[in-house]
Image (spheres, rainbow, N blue to C red):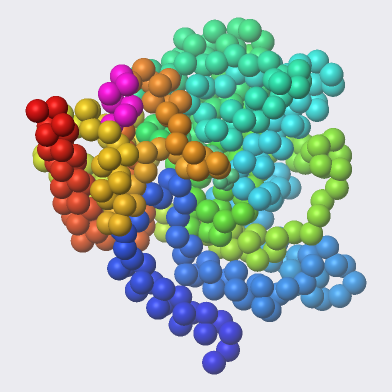
Amino acid sequence: MNRIALAQKETAVRDTRIATLRPIYLDHHSTTPVDPRVAAIVLDTMVNAFGNANSVDHTHGEAAMDLVERATAEVADLTGSDVSGVRFTSGSTESIRLAIGHAIAMRGGRALRIAATTVEHQAVLDAIGIGVRSGLAEVLWVDVDAEANVRPESLQAALRESVDLVCVMAANNEVGTIYPIEQIARDVHLAGGKILVDGTQAVGRVDLRVTDWDLDYLAFSSHKIYGPKGVGALAVAGNDVHTEITARVLGHDGTLNVPGIAGFGEACRLIGLEGVGDEKRVRASRDRLEARLLRDLPGIVVNGNRGNRLAHNLHISLPGLPNDAVIGRLRNKVAVSTGAACSSGAQTPSHVLKAMGLSEEMQEGAIRIGLGKYTTQDEVDCAADEIVAAAREVAESMQGVRG
Ligand code: PLP
């Protein structure tokens, strides 16, 4: 059996395992399982196309570079970018830092004026924080409403302050709210600024077009779209930006992660081909789960913009029920989370829910559920039973304490 056939056989076994994996995995905002077809490409690249893509003296290098170029075309296709505007990174965090680092470098000494929404991911907040602490950037905050939508008047007020760079995510990683990027990019450009879009949760799920919408920077990551971890991209509207990034921010490029890049390209191709159908099914499953929870858990609140959120997102608050107690009871049965999986793994109150103005009780009872393309109906129904049972147990134990 050749290596690819072997990989396919192994991944078929894994496919079956995914369907029966316990605890039921409902934390797809944090990361997604690798699609077995992607894993087969990664393995094949590691074993058969192991050349250094920068080796120009032999065909091993050439074969590796071919794979990188193919992946570049897939990334560009998915995001409506020009191939010359795609740069591979280790993931969104690095893409975001590169973009902000580049924008700072282009200021030539004067502090970069950044406007950012209060619900940006920690990766954006940290990158801005580094700039601010070192005196290279200053920040204006753009407020959101109770559903995490950007408040237009707050954005317009920031744009009147002649900001250089506006950071807006395409979709929120906690409550799933989707942002009107095309419109915001137009407003930012009219005001003379540039836009950095964190597309980590949205690429492949929400329409985003780098060239048509003239997005100055779009950051995203492979492991949110069933690709391998540790690889992502920064797509930019102007291809000369990459030359500047290399010259001003990076200095030079190292050896490329060819297996990761090839897998990422395949993940982009697959979500481009199958994403619409997958989303339809996932949305129906999410709605089924939501309906069950709304029916069986009195007082439950669904957070975010219910009419305009990611199809796989279900973010709930169970007022009066501490989320750690509920999630603790679910630990071996259903994998859900209190919110963003930050790099330290530390549990801190969610800045997103705070920015939305949720009461402390609603913040403490918040649970993020994220479905995926492999989530089955059985898993949805079983997860609903488990979540309802866990919430009831916690409510009873709290009544016992109070009583
Ligand atoms: N931005 C958002 C909205 C995210 O959800 C994440 C990951 O959770 C990141 C950035 C960081 O992505 P990465 O893990 O690829 O560095």
108 left or right of 280 in image: right
Please say whether residue 257 is one of the residues in the magenta stretch: no
78 left or right of 278 in image: right
Q: In this view, does 61 lie above or below 221?
A: below
Q: Is residue 293 above or below residue 258?
A: above
Q: Quadrant of residue 158?
A: top right
122 left or right of 283 in image: right
Determine the main secondary structure of the stretch shown in magenta: helix
Find the magenta span and give its range.
359-365
Q: Where does residue 216 sit, x and y in percent of width and height?
A: 66, 32
Q: Where does residue 357 sit, x and y in percent of width and height?
A: 36, 17
Q: In which quarter of the image is residue 2?
A: bottom right
Front one among 393 and 10: 393
Q: In this view, does 359 lie above or below 364?
A: above
Q: In this view, does 328 lie above or below 249?
A: below
Quarter of the rendered image showing ligand 1 = top right
Residue 9 seen by the camera = yes
